[in-house]
Image (cartoon, rainbow, N blue to C red):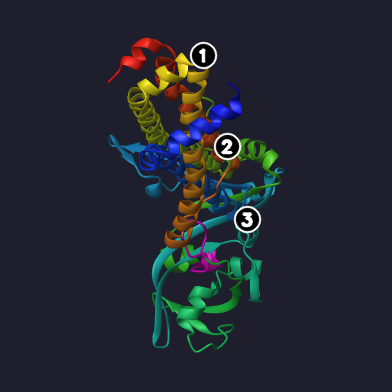
Amino acid sequence: MNLFNLFKIALKALGNNKMRCFLTMLGIIIGVGSVITMLAIGQGSKESIKANIAEMGSNMIMIMPGTDMRGGVRQSSDDMQKLKPADYESLREGLTYVQGISPEVSSQGQFINGNNNYPSKVSGVAIDYLYIRKLTVEQGSMFTERDIQGAAKVCIIGKTVADELFPSGESPIGKVIRFNKIPFKVVGILKSKGYNSMGQDQDDVVLAPYTTIMKRVLAIDYLQMLFASAVSEEQTELAIDEISEILRKNHKLKAGDDDDFNIRSQQELSSMMSSTSDMMTLLLACVAGISLLVGGIGIMNIMYVSVTERTREIGLRMSIGARGIDILTQFLIESIIISITGGLIGVILGCGSAWIVNVLFHWPVQIQIFSVILSFVVCTVTGVFFGWYPAKKASNLDPIEALRYE
């Protein structure tokens, strides 16, 4: 019997039990749809993390004070005072693989302009900070080196802060705002960057000379953090080694001493976040894959029932010349049709679900072609694998015994 006739017989057999056929497909549909949706959410999250890191500068390097033990108690890096302005000056003058470096000291507080107020953070930085963090002054200008040397009470603000303190739409340039009773003259407004992929408002920012924040706001003589930008991503490791060498020399650390500072790069952060995201995506895919397994078992159960119900039909066909291979092929075709049809519906359901998740919940999703192909291949293999045993059982039936079956 040729394959085309077997295909028609299989379709007719499935058509006679439409509801049972659909319920059998349901496990495959849910499994394939779940795998595609979960992988889309996982990949979307991964790309979102990468985009968020890229927004901060792909070459960025962060230098922070290290932790230490005092009286048997490990201190937080926030309590350490290892980074000094002298370290910044040494790095600024001695680095060859870095094209920008800036300190950062910050303080939380309330900004006030007349009757308007807004809680935010002021960050004390140097001029290179704009380049490192990919920021642009849209109106006015950046404060100058003279402002930094003189600890001038000037600042540049983000669009969110400008809108909150100047809701009437007047230009903030040249106006004076207060931060915890300290007056700051607004000399520039940053170009809007909106919310990043992590949902953080990148326009909620106020920048001032780091010397001003150190002396007039925090009254400290140390730096909380340093930001640097390597010449290129490929030279990030060379830049880190160079920074480490200069800081160890400044801090008079011996060869066997541990660093009293920590250096983190965007590459390291990106790698760590991507690894975590991949692990979560794999976990989600495995959970969704269980549905495919359940769907495959459903196919085997239904095909097994089908073989039992159609024992007399099988006996009759074998008695008039049908071979065991013909019976085997017919039942395999039925299981493959169920799995492939369920797979196609599952692909549509998965893509649709991913789109709904993106629209309703604003979660980043990215449907990958390989996940669609993989799900489809897996459901086809599932149909063959779980359909083989019932098909083999049918092909091994004795025609006489099958005809006598009640």
Q: Amino acid at mark 2?
A: Ile
Distance in Å between CA atoms under marks 3 and 2: 41 Å
Q: What percent of the width, then of the height, locates residue 118?
A: 40, 76
Which contiguous range is marked in magenta? 195-212
Secondary structure type for disc 2: helix
Between marks 1 and 2 in the image, the one whose residue lies nearer the viewer: 1
Circle nearer the N terminus (1, 2): 1
Q: Are marks 1 and 2 in contact (CB under 8 Å)?
A: no
Circle nearer the N terminus (1, 3): 3
- Crowding at dot 1, Cα within 10 Å, few <14 / some 14-19 / many 20+, comes out as some
Distance in Å between CA atoms under marks 1 and 3: 75 Å
Q: Amino acid at mark 1?
A: Arg
Residue located at (60% from left, 78% from top): 187
Q: Which mark is residue 373?
A: 2
Secondary structure type for disc 1: loop
- Crowding at dot 2, Cα within 10 Å, few <14 / some 14-19 / many 20+, comes out as few
The reply to whether the magenta stretch includes residue 205 is: yes
The quadrant holding residue 181 is bottom left
Q: Amino acid at mark 3?
A: Ile
Distance in Å between CA atoms under marks 1 and 2: 34 Å
Q: What percent of the width, then of the height, locates residue 46?
A: 52, 45
* Residue located beneath label 3 in the image: 132
* Residue located beneath label 1 in the image: 323
Residue located at (55% from left, 83% from top): 172
Q: Are marks 3 and 2 in contact (CB under 8 Å)?
A: no
| In front of the other: 285 or 226 | 285
Instruction: Please identify the quadrant where the N terminus is shown.
Output: top right
Left/right placement of residue 235 relative to residue 350 reads right
The reply to whether the magenta stretch includes residue 229 is: no
